[in-house]
Image (spheres, grey):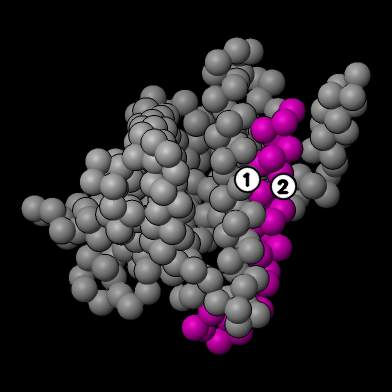
Amino acid sequence: MATSSIAGGARRAQDNGGIKVLGRVGMACFGLVYLIVAYLAVQVAVGGSGQQADQTGALSEIASKPFGAVLLWVLAIGLLAFGVWQLLMAATSFHWVEEGAKRTVKRLGAAGRGVVGISVAIASIRIATGSGSQGGDSKQQEMTGKLLALPAGPVIVGVVALVVIGVGVASIVSGVRKSFMKDLDTSELPNGSRRWVEKLGMVGHIAKGVGIAIIGILLGFAALNSDAGEAGGLDAALRTLAGQPFGTALLIVVALGFAAFAAYCLAAAKAHRT
């Protein structure tokens, strides 16, 4: 009874028009962060970036601009709204997906995006208030070090690595199969734009999946060698990619994919089902 009441309350909150608007604005903010990450990734590719090519680096880049603190506060509010919206969807939504494993995976993905959105919002507030924010690589290494210190720590980190790689592969598969389009009400899109949204989403999900999968691979190396220093976040993943044969070209392609994902987020902000 209590669980049903909580779920019902979450559903009513999600159906609230104000929550929907904030959530959609938040998705647009989420896309903006990825657009700046794409810019920073290109800078890494050409050797001209002093910022980390991840969400924290994107926020620091915004902070360096005129009225940066104001923009960070606006972004923080939007991302908090996005995070809450995704968590509400994780609790009660995806009714258009067949009940069972597929719906569970969708809800877990929404929960993950909710946590990411809220964490990036908190980082935005910390940077806006001058408190600073720990870079993604440092946080990843610190957390990995704590896990490695546990009994069977390398095994735990190895399992986490496999999960992260799985998330990345799932994003790639979603891009290839274009299954992300099922989450959009295409009647809400401008006439003739469906094809472009589909292409942008396909490229964007594949690029995002590649970045996530490389993070998982770095975690795997950290587990195998019991060395937290080998772990890293998105910045480390992109710099690892840049260090490979034809790495500069590959990194630019991934950066363009991130930009495509940012554009897809703008479309999804208007047409995402709730």
Is the residue marked by circle 1 packed among few (<14), some (14-19), or many (20+) residues within 10 Å?
A: many
Disc 1 target residue: 114
Horizontal side of 131 relative to 22 (left or right) equals left
Name the spot of residue 4 as percent of width and height, x first. 86, 22
Magenta residues, start to end: 63-92
Q: Main secondary structure of the magenta part?
A: helix
Q: Is residue 79 above or below residue 126?
A: above
Residue 73 lies in magenta, yes or no? yes
State the separation of the CA atoms marked 1 and 2: 6 Å
Q: Looking at the picture, how far across and down is residue 196, in whole percent?
A: 43, 41
Q: Would residue 19 be counted in the magenta stretch? A: no
Q: Counting other residues with Cα less than 10 Å from the Cα at mark 2, is it few (<14), some (14-19), or many (20 or more)?
A: many
- Disc 1 marks a residue whose amino acid type is Gly
Residue shown at the point (75%, 50%) measured from the top left: 21
Q: Which residue is mark 2?
A: 84
Whether residue 115 appears in this view of the structure is: yes
Residue 191, quarter of the rendered image: top right
Is residue 209 visible in the rendered image? The answer is no
Q: Vertical placement of 45 versus 160: above or below?
A: below
Query: Which of the 4 image quarters holds residue 15?
Result: top right
